[in-house]
């Protein structure tokens, strides 16, 4: 099933770009079907080829497919608001960064893990899956649940699922089930130096 | 001009993915031609639509097009090693994150700016441009040169240019002018918890 919302009617780009960037958004409505493991692996495969400082690849992913103890463990770390719609996710993924390299801090760990996350999100969107990143989870509990080594930091929780009509969502989430807008380019792009 | 290296011969994916992820890499050889402003804007446009926590969009970009004072200012912040090949860049871009929101820390600022950077890199690769991120620059000098407000942090410098044959590079850079490999998926993807 395609997304229930006709994306193009919401988003306009100021300059021409590949349509994948406008198409990708962060829906919440999912149909409760699990994500097959090879499909999930395709998303990690996309993440795998992201660039990173000195090719250190600081990203790691802890996943759980629906109806498994791994999923349930990650689900328990979510805030109540996110549990309300993630109950229909087909998989949950904790994105984790290695903050160090050979005992020294890697100052690009979060930035580079963000680049891997974006690749994962785009690959999921290209497969017409819901891919929705969240900060609304208990970072300490997630660290413990995923048995992360010292020096590894949760960066985001990611819900992945098959899209569903908006009526699948709790009522309080239905109104915001549409692609969000963005700042204008002139608000975040500057020549040479910060304005003013 | 297309990249001088036949990417597909270097990189193999374990699971099927959109070809853009294997095609994108970080060349250094550029031909010294400038990047036209509308083309650069298309790269920022792709970045614009990245996801972010609460849609805060913490990313900002300070750019300089070749043969302008803005370019020269950014170029002066680069380490000598990067200057050696960035001398042929068509544009330089400083990726900057807003570490705060309404006076409170935004813990996703670097991660989300990384996702915008990945979109920029993919759009550039789709346009057959060289897009190469770097940490090898003076962060304090860059902060000063770009007149960044307090609370804003440089995350990466990005060289953008038109591709050139490897012979355009200083000799010491020629051998590594090829797409890098990656860890295997089993090295960074785990079910439920960290192994061991």
Image (tube, coloured by chain):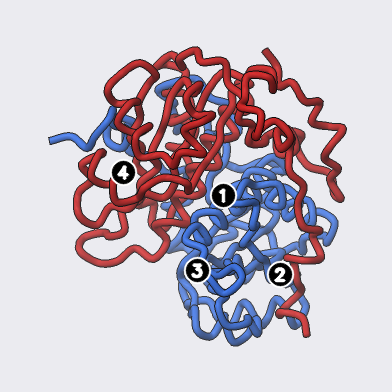
Chain colours: A blue, B red
Could you tell me which chain the residue with mark 1 belongs to? Answer: A
Disc number placed over residue A115 in the picture, else none = 1
In this figure, which residue is indicated by the disc labeled 3?
A105
**In the drawing, does residue A5 fall left or right of residue B150?**
right
Q: Tell me where residue B196 appears, x and y as whole percent.
A: 78, 85
In-image side of B183 versus A173 (left or right):
right
- Circle 1: element type: helix
- Which residue lies at the image location 59% right of the left edge and 63% below the top edge? A158
Which residue reaches farthest front? B171
Query: What residue is shown at x 47% (from left), y 18% (from top)?
Result: B39
Front residue (pair A118, A2): A118
Identify the residue position indicated by label 4 in the image: B142
Residue at disc 4, secondary structure: helix
Where is residue A29 drawn, in percent x and y? 58, 56
> Is A37 above or below relative to B157?
below
The N terminus of chain A sits in image quarter: top right
Closer to the N terminus: mark 2 or mark 3? 2
Q: Are marks 2 and 3 in contact (CB under 8 Å)?
A: no
Neighbourhood count class around disc 2 (C-alpha, 10 Å): few under 14, some 14–19, many 20 upward: many
Secondary structure beneath label 2? strand
Viewer-nearest of labels 2 and 3?
3
Split into 4 quadrants, where in the image is the C terminus of chain A?
Answer: top left
Alpha carbons under labels 2 and 4: distance apart: 38 Å
- Please tell me which of labels 1 and 3 falls first in the chain: 3
B188 or B139, which is in the foreground? B139
């Amino acid at each position: 099933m395609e997304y229930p919302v006709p994306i193009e009617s919401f988003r306009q780009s100021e300059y021409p770009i590949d349509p994948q960037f406008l198409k990708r958004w962060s829906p919440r409505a999912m149909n409760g079907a699990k994500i097959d493991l090879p499909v999930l692996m395709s998303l990690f495969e996309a993440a795998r080829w992201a660039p990173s400082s000195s090719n250190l690849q600081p990203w790691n992913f802890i996943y759980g497919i629906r109806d498994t103890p791994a999923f349930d463990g990650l689900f328990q770390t979510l805030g109540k608001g996110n549990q309300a719609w993630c109950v229909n996710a087909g998989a949950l993924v904790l994105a984790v960064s290695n903050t160090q390299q050979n005992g020294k801090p890697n100052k690009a760990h979060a930035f580079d893990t963000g680049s891997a996350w974006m690749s994962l999100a785009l690959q999921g969107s290209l497969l017409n899956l819901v891919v929705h990143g969240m900060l609304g989870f208990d970072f300490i509990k997630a660290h413990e649940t995923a048995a992360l080594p010292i020096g590894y930091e949760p960066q985001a929780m990611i819900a992945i699922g098959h899209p569903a009509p908006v009526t699948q969502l709790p009522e309080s989430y239905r109104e915001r089930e549409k692609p969000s807008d963005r700042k204008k380019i002139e608000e975040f792009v500057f020549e040479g130096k910060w304005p003013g």
